[in-house]
Image (tube, grey):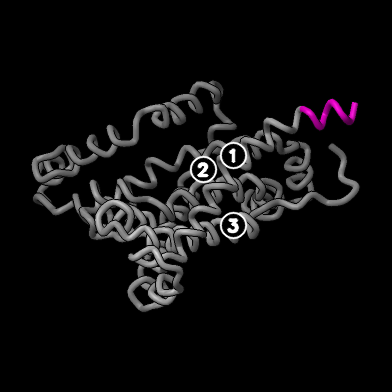
Amino acid sequence: MQKTRNWYLIPYSFWIALFVIAPIVLVVYYSFLDLEGHFSLINYQKFFTSTYLTMTLSSFWYAFLITFFSLAIGYPTAYLLTKTKHKQLWLLLIILPTWINLLLKAYAFIGLFSTYGWANQTLEAIGIGRKQILFTDFSFVFVSVYIFIPFMILPIFNAIEKLNPSLVFAARDLGASNFMTFRRVVFPLTLDGVKSGCQLVFIPALSLFMITRLIAGNRVITLGTAIEQQFLVTQNWGMGATIAVFLIIAMAIILALTSTKRKKGATT
């Protein structure tokens, strides 16, 4: 039985080695090459300058905003979904936009937020007047939250669904208010879903690049935008690989901080 199981691991190990480990090794290798292809630490020295450090802080700030608003909207939505009759249907309607191509959704928002788009027409109709909505921080965060919010709702919904309702009833029988029950019972027991949702939103938000160009008009510079520019515009693969290395490290740290550790002796 053990030998058979080991044989089944061969395709999986080959896949991991070829499509996970090998690309990371190549990225690390290119990060040590300068423009002439010589081994050098110049890329790492450049990364720790004020320009790239500011860009890194900006990436984390926008990723935090996107995750925060996704959580602020996603948790109440997931909670209300568990209380509705046709919860699976509503959940499907929330997940459905993720099946649409990201580029199509970005161009749809360009039309909505443009000078003569529906958003500005609404503002003009209520007397506020036309505003510059497209190519702003607001439009970038708004569209990003719209795109990522299903990935926040789904794990939280699953966590709330698994919550034993008798624990909530017991808290209320003991005199706890609705807010106290949520703070001391519901939220702590669904924290794993919150962590999973934050992982699914924060990590991709760090490497956004297409939305920054189409929606933010390059006013927002993220690590993903910088990597794209280094590889495709300036053709400095070494610097692009260096930024990618730090992005990988940041993702690994986030995964480690938000991972859920199982207690020993826990039953499955």
Res. 137 mark: none
- Contact flag, marks 1 and 3 (Cβ < 8 Å): no
Q: For the residues marked 2 and 3, what is the alpha-carbon distance in whole angstroms?
A: 19 Å
Residue 88, quarter of the rendered image: top right
Find numbered disc 3 in the image and state the secondary structure of the residue it sits on. Answer: helix
Which span is picked out in magenta?
1-7
Pair 1/3: label in front: 3
Q: Is residue 255 left or right of residue 70?
A: right
Up-down relation of residue 195 to residue 267 (above or below): below
Task: Give whichever of 140, 85 is nearer the camera.
Answer: 140
Where's the C terminus, which quadrant?
A: top right
Find numbered disc 1 in the image and state the secondary structure of the residue it sits on. Answer: helix
> What is the total number of numbered labels drawn onto the structure image?
3
Q: Which amino acid does label 1 sit on?
A: Pro
Mark 2 lies on residue: 152
Mark 3 lies on residue: 252
- Contact flag, marks 2 and 3 (Cβ < 8 Å): no
- Contact flag, marks 2 and 1 (Cβ < 8 Å): yes
Residue 1, quarter of the rendered image: top right
Res. 155 mark: 1
